[in-house]
Image (tube, grey):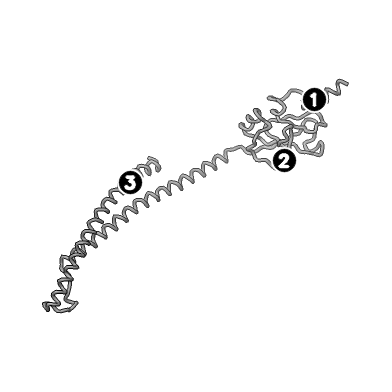
Amino acid sequence: MSFLEEFNANLESLPNILARHYAVLRNLDKSLQDIQRQNEQRCEQEIEDIKREIKSGNITPDTSLIRFSDEALDEQKHSIGIADEKVMLAVRAYDLVDTHIQQLDQYLKTFEEELRERDTVAASALPAPSVDTGAKPGRSSEGGRGGRKKTRLATATAATATAAVNPTAMDLDIPVDPNEPTYCLCNQVSYGEMVACENPNCKVEWFHFGCVGLKDKPKGKWYCPDCAALKNRRKGR
């Protein structure tokens, strides 16, 4: 049986146990009130009797010799015993509840530690971002129009799938350097599969597959829509 199952089993019995304790407390309280009321009446009567005896001269007004009857004293002792029993029952009920609270606190602490361990394991299992510094064919990775360096962060499978459906509206979950250059028609950072335009004078250079309608890597030379249109216009002259 797991800790949680054991805790739930103990918790289910707690209300019945507390109900029995409270029922006994109510009965003791009722008995205590009855005995106290009876004792007060007895003591008041005995005080009146003592006053009459002193007035009649039957007893001397010596306070050291004046005392309540044994019955009155026994009732007072009995009242004290019932009060002590009530205190013990109340303490026992409190300890029962406190024990369950401590067990729950321990379970929550253990559960939080397990969650932290799972998060640590999950974080360590994630692949580290890889950097591909390869430039387009025929161009230096550090040179070409201001020496802009082409860097591409590896993305998760989910990000790649989302890019194929709606690449321009993709919400990247990967860490993005605010200083990283942007590419493509969508003017976003590099992610997923990208293709380079073969025009050395292309203003954009790199494009996401989804943004230019590609699913696979093109065979041979590939030109972006703007450069392809410009090339066709030149051929027509």
Q: Is residue 83 above or below residue 18?
A: below
Q: If you read the primary sequence from the N terminus, does the residue marked by circle 1 or circle 2 appear first? A: 2
Residue 114 x, y percent position in the rendering: 48, 43
Q: If you read the primary sequence from the N terminus, does the residue marked by circle 3 or circle 1 appear first? A: 3
Q: Are marks 2 and 3 in contact (CB under 8 Å)?
A: no
Find the distance from the CA under tag 2 to the CA under tag 3.
62 Å
Residue 80 x, y percent position in the rendering: 24, 62
- Helix, strand or loop at label 3? It is helix
Give the left or right position of residue 169, taking residue 87 as reference.
Answer: right
Q: In this view, does 196 lie above or below 180?
A: above
Residue shown at the point (77%, 33%) measured from the top left = 204
- Helix, strand or loop at label 2? It is loop
Q: Is residue 213 above or below residue 121?
A: above
Quadrant where the image shows the C terminus = top right
Quadrant where the image shows the N terminus = top left
Mark 1 surroundings: few (<14), some (14-19) or many (≥20) residues within 10 A = some
- Helix, strand or loop at label 1? It is helix
Find the distance from the CA under tag 1 to the CA under tag 2.
27 Å
> What amino acid type is highlighted by mark number 2?
Glu
Q: Are marks 1 and 2 in contact (CB under 8 Å)?
A: no
Mark 2 or 3: the one toward you = 3
Give the left or right position of residue 52, taking residue 90 as reference.
Answer: left
Please state which of residues 82 and 45 is positioned toward the viewer in this rendering: 45
> What amino acid type is highlighted by mark number 3?
Pro
Residue 129 x, y percent position in the rendering: 65, 38
Mark 3 surroundings: few (<14), some (14-19) or many (≥20) residues within 10 A = few
Give the left or right position of residue 91, taking residue 67 as reference.
Answer: right
Which residue has dot 3 on it?
Answer: 15
Which residue has dot 2 on it?
Answer: 180
Q: Residue 228 carries which label?
A: 1
Residue shown at the point (54%, 41%) measured from the top left = 121
